Image (cartoon, rainbow, N blue to C red):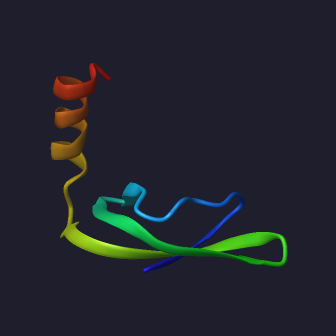
Amino acid sequence: MRLAMTRPLADDTALRIRIDEDQYLGEVTHCSRQGERYLVGVSLFNVMRNVGEVTERLNRILLGR
């Protein structure tokens, strides 16, 4: 996966990306500046579809949110 960001991220940074009801877990593999933005390469190691409700419950239990 490649993301366009407004700030750089360090290699090996763990990420959780949520898009609608899907969640992607991965790690930054590289980051390079491209004009005003940074292109961040992400190696995905887990993709969970339609898990919005489960994620919210886990956040409440684990993070108190």
Q: What residue occupies the far top of the structure in this picture? A: 64
Quarter residue 48 falls in? bottom left
Where in the figure is residue 11, as x and y percent of width and height? 48, 65
Give coordinates of residue 24: x percent, y percent.
30, 65
| Residue 33 versus residue 22 in the image, above or below | below
Left or right, 7 with reference to 60? right
Q: Is residue 2 above or below residue 21?
A: below
Q: Who's the residue at 25% across and 37% down the image?
A: 56
Please state if 9 lies on the left or on the right of 15 as rendered: right
Quadrant of the image containing the N terminus: bottom left
Residue 56 sits above or below residue 26 on the image: above
Where is residue 14 drawn, in percent x and y?
36, 55
Residue reaching furthest to the front = 11
Q: Position of residue 45 (x, y in %)?
A: 22, 71
Picture quadrant of residue 7: bottom right
Quarter where residue 12 is shown = bottom left
Q: Please state which of residues 1 and 19 is positioned toward the viewer in this rendering.
A: 1
Which residue is at a point 27% across and 25% down the rendered structure image? Answer: 63
